[in-house]
Structure formats: structure tokens, C-alpha cells
Amino acid sequence: MDLSTIPWELILPIIILQFILMIVAFVDLIKVYDTNGPKWLWVIIIFISGIIGSIIYFIVGRRNE
């Protein structure tokens, strides 16, 4: 696989967005006291699933007080 054939101008913004969402989700997970489900499971979901896991955490994982 030749890395020069990858369209980085299209892929790089998605990669940056994924890392930003993951960091925000991890920081929020640390700050919040109670979540829907165990925190260790949310860490695994966010880390493995990437951008989808972060979005799922913000929709399902956070408890509205």
C-alpha cells in the first residue's frame, strides 16, 4: 500500500474530528458522577468504536440530571 495515493485532504479532517470527540468524551466521562452503565464499559466503547462510540456515549451514556 502506497501512502502517497491516500487522499489525506479528505481523511485528515475526519481523523482530527474523531480524536477531538474521543478526548471530549473521555474528559466528560471523568467529570460526570453517574452514567447509564459502568464507566469502564464506556471507556472501552469510546476507545474501540472511535467516532461512533463517542457519539453513542453523548446520546445514551450520559444521565440527565
Image (cartoon, helix red, strand yellow):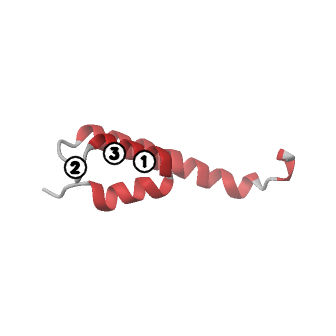
| Quarter of the rendering occupied by the C terminus | bottom left
Tell me: 3 left or right of 18: right
- Who's the residue at 30% across and 44% down the image? 28
Q: Nearer the viewer, residue 47 or 9?
A: 47
Tell me: 35 left or right of 55: left
Q: CB of mark 3 within 8 Å of CB of mark 2?
A: no
Q: CB of mark 1 within 8 Å of CB of mark 2?
A: no
> Which of the marked residues, 1 or 3, is nearer the chain's N terminus?
3
- Who's the residue at 18% across and 46% down the image? 34
Q: Which mark is residue 41?
A: 3
Question: Could you tell me the amino acid type at mark 3?
Answer: Leu
For label 3, count other residues whose C-alpha is less than 10 Å away and answer few (under 14), some (14-19) or many (20+): few
| Secondary structure of the residue carrying numbered label 2 | loop
Tell which tag, 3 or 2, sits nearer the viewer. Answer: 3
In this rendering, is residue 30 above or below 15?
A: above
Tell which tag, 1 or 3, sits nearer the viewer. Answer: 3
Question: Could you tell me the amino acid type at mark 1?
Answer: Ile
**Residue indicated by mark 1:** 46
Label 1 to label 2, Cα distance in Å?
A: 14 Å
> Which of the marked residues, 1 or 2, is nearer the chain's N terminus?
2
For label 1, count other residues whose C-alpha is less than 10 Å away and answer few (under 14), some (14-19) or many (20+): many
Number of numbered discs overlaid on the protein picture: 3
> Which of the marked residues, 3 or 2, is nearer the chain's N terminus?
2
- Furthest residue in direction left, as rendered: 65
Question: Could you tell me the amino acid type at mark 2?
Answer: Thr
Give how far across and how far down residue 37 sits, in percent: 24, 50
Residue 36: quarter of image: bottom left
Q: Which mark is residue 35?
A: 2
Give how far across and how far down residue 19 sits, in percent: 52, 45
Label 1 to label 3, Cα distance in Å?
A: 9 Å
